[in-house]
Image (cartoon, helix red, strand yellow):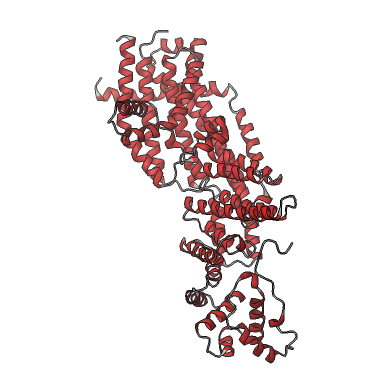
Amino acid sequence: MNPVSTIKAIPGHVSRTSVIARHAFTQLVRMKVFYFLAFFAVILIASNFFNLPQHEGPESAGVNILRSIKSWSLGAMTLFSVVLSIVATALLLPKDVEDRTLYTILAKPVPRLDYLAGKLLGVLLLVFVSLALMDILMVGILQLRTNMVLTDQMAMAEARGWPAADIALLKAEILAQGPTASLQGAVFSVFLRSSIIASMALLISTFSSSTLFTTIISFLIYFIGHFQADARAAYLSGEAGTSDGILARGVTLLVSLVLPDFQLFNVIDSVIEGQVMPLFIVGKLTLIGLFYAIFYILASWFIFAEKEF
Amino acid sequence: MTQGKKYGVLVLAILAAGGLRLPFERSLTNDLQAANLLPRKLEMRTGEKIGQTFSAVSLGGLRTLIATLLNLRAFSFFSEQKWVDVEDTFDVIVDLAPRTRYYWDTGSWHQAYNAASYYLYESEIPPLRRKLAWRESILKGQAFLERGIRNNPDDPKLYEGLGVLLSDSNKIAAFSSPNEAYEKSYEAFMAAVETGNARGYAKRAALYSLARVPGREMDALALANEIRKENPRLPPTVLGLLYTLNYHEDPAQDVLTLADSIFPNRKIAYEILGNQWMRTRDYFPVDGIARVMPLLEKELGVSEEDSVLKVKLLSPMNPDEGR
């Protein structure tokens, strides 16, 4: 195929992929996954009541509740996005086979890469929309609560005759616990991690025999992936003087090369604790997320391309 | 291509992609560590204490959530006055969320203040054990705050908390050497000032501690003068210390002239210095007060019987008193 015809073919790929993505999204929405949002709202409201006034001094009253709201919200987002990414992706191919939709699609001139990319994008769109809705809810509640804490604390500081500089410090400290750009960076890292998990589950589902197998293996890889950084560090710092050392280095190298490093995306705890997430880190995380997603989708296509149904 | 060959190629591709991303991931890990964004490794005992489920969940970026849940559990232990459980729970909490000041602050407060008071007033414990438990709790609270500072060296409030604890007149008897405690308290307050985010009182608090260390009077005077330069409207304690520290430097000077150079008027000088004289539990220096008081009392018409110098003073703090 010459370059001109390749460029001409791109809109066709994009439109086919987006049609399949929309269909996958609708298919998943019909599975009533958004009911989770009601559950999330309950968690969010409940997290507002975990205030322990006897447990904190007047100068930090209410600030801990802001941390509690963020912990509960981001925790729920993480769990929801991981479970949804794995289960929804694991379900997609077997469901299409079961409904015989797959045969109808593949009988048409639809490249299998477009089909896989469309399916994955459908899942990612669902995860993105869900996270965005949860994020809006979290930011709304957090903003309201931050304003309340700020009003109370400012009144306390003024009543005690605090100097203006001390009041400004207190204000900055409270605002740092409210909705910040770093918090949005943390939510985005949750989405990036979900994208990797979903694309990895897609690869597994192309050769797996059942949904259950895909789900279990994906969860296992997800958990083991949190130790990849340790394996990499052990490999890079290890000594290979003994036969045990050589074996250990071999295993750690294998783990480092095969498994994704999910620990990289574990920034939410630090952000909840008040650390700032620089923009270049968001950029680098996006790059590595894209690398994984593109690699896994191409690998899935490689296995799926000539698969007989 | 056969199925077997395909899987072979896939495995090779995965390994090659792994080799490609490895240096990038390593550099990103370093960036994340530099920005304090990567969670630290959990200690073995934390994993054992929180159980397998929590350990697994904590891997996935839910450590702060578990810390929040454990904080609720610690509150129950606190309500039931189970101090060992409170201590254990906070040990786990701070391992999960080492950068949250609140947990260090609260964990230390429970040990140094709540548990200490509980042991002091617990009639079922023999008196000697009671005093020992009181002391141990305060020292545990101090050690916990010091651990918090090592984990958060830029946090001024943890330094301030340590400074307050080490100079607390109700706790000073717990420390083997009060002078050393005041010296450490001064260092803690000054460390808070050096972070650049300390509240205005931190420097004054550093002065209050330093002034109580025998042999550091000159340094304390220099600090007091610095504070005076920065803020002409000074609280009574600083004025009182300015008097006693200046007197300590030159005991031969005229005390009324000295008092006039520090206090707005002699009535205020009498009130402030009288209070400082009676605050024996705070260990503030009283140099020159006994000399100036009779002169001020004479001028203000205070009879000899009502003299501040004749008031029966409390002995310095000991945990058996005041009950």
Quarter containing the N terminus of chain B: top left
Task: Look at the picture and state if A277 lies above or below B132.
Answer: above
Q: Which is more toward the observer, B34 or A307?
A: B34
Can the viewer see residue A228?
A: yes
Task: Look at the picture and state if A80 lies above or below B183.
Answer: above
Q: Position of residue A70 (x, y in %)?
A: 57, 42
Residue beneath the point at 38% across and 16% down: A112
The quadrant holding residue A286 is: top left
Q: Position of residue A197 (x, y in %)?
A: 45, 27
Q: Which is more toward the observer, B188 or A107?
A: B188
Q: Which is more toward the observer, B214 or A150?
A: B214
Residue beneath the point at 48% across and 11% down: A97
Quarter containing the C terminus of chain B: bottom right
The quadrant holding residue B284 is: bottom right
Can the viewer see residue A133?
A: no
Q: Position of residue A190 (x, y in %)?
A: 48, 35
Task: Look at the picture and state if B275 lies above or below B261.
Answer: above
The quadrant holding residue B30 is: top left
Q: Position of residue A214 (x, y in %)?
A: 47, 18
In this view, which residue lies farthest toward the left?
A: A2
Q: Is residue B117 left or right of residue A132?
A: right
Residue beneath the point at 31% across and 9% down: B2
Task: Look at the picture and state if B146 lies above or below A208.
Answer: below
Residue beneath the point at 55% across and 91% down: B254
**Count the marks: how many?**
0
Q: Is residue A191 left or right of residue A61?
A: left
Q: Which is more toward the observer, A293 or B212?
A: B212
